[in-house]
Amino acid sequence: MTTVADVLAFVETLAPRSMKESWDKVGLNVGHLNRPVTKILVALDPFDHVCREAKATGAQLLVTHHTLLFHPGFVSDASAQGKNALFLIENGIAHINAHTNLDLAPEGVNDALAARLELSQVRVLSPRGLDEQGREWGLLRGGFVPEQSLPEFLTFVRQRLGCEGLRYVSGGKPVRHVAVGGGACCDEMGQAAEAGCDTFVTSDAKYNDFWDARDLGLNLIDAGHFYTENPVIPLLAEKIAAAFPEVTVQISETHQDCMKFF
């Protein structure tokens, strides 16, 4: 019989806790470690509709990239995150997350993003160490695409990620050497430029980030937080399903980006 503890131990082989940022909260957010599991729902976020979907599908475990209780506070119905935590607890649903450890791990968020954008010769930019298999791990990935104009690459990114729109600034260069950082990785823009990349695909860029990128001669593309991280979810679900063939693993059908373009 598979338990929550079994799934947690497996997820932490994919994204070791030792790789997380010091401020992050990863692992079992709510639930009993010894709870039997026959069905798992996998999603990017543990938001209200996903929690309700977990109940509706009969899942005993929800596995997400983002944490349930990111900001310190009380578990009460006074906040959205508190309501979600209470809903899972009251319905006997455990929740596991792998956040920055999955961002930095080999075959994690940023390798999935690099693969979705069909980068070749992918490498870790500024490695932080080696894992137990001798693979480098770290935040950003860099790789290459066939040289093309920025408008051509923008069209490709939008199609491959399925996003409704992109925010970008031109650094005045064609696209060939691309860095990727899923989610809020704009603070690492200098690292992408120092690595010789002409283009950086990430999300959550601020106003000044676009000006800074232009000054660096870097094409900066903000493809959205959801769209740059979601490519890892099918891979995570696939690996969990392969490790636990007796368990039904389902990807959320309700979760999508709430931000729209008018």
Image: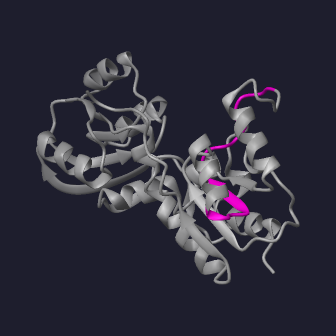
Q: Nearer the viewer, residue 224 or 91?
A: 91
Q: Horizontal and vertical percent for residue 155?
A: 17, 46
Whether residue 230 appears in magenta in the rendering, the answer is: no
Going by the image, does 239 lie left or right of 20?
A: left
Residue drawn at (32%, 51%), measured in percent from left and top?
161
Q: Does residue 47 appear in the picture of this structure?
A: no
Going by the image, does 26 lie left or right of 153?
A: right
| Image quadrant in which you'd find residue 209 | top left
Task: Relative to 177, say whether 209 is above or below.
Answer: above
Report the magenta residues as a range.
57-73
Task: Relative to 118, say whether 46 is above or below.
Answer: above
Residue drawn at (46%, 52%), measured in percent from left and top?
110
Q: Does residue 6 appear in the picture of this structure?
A: yes
**Dominant SS in magenta:** loop
Residue drawn at (24%, 29%), measured in percent from left and top?
217
Task: Relative to 164, say whether 65 is above or below.
Answer: below
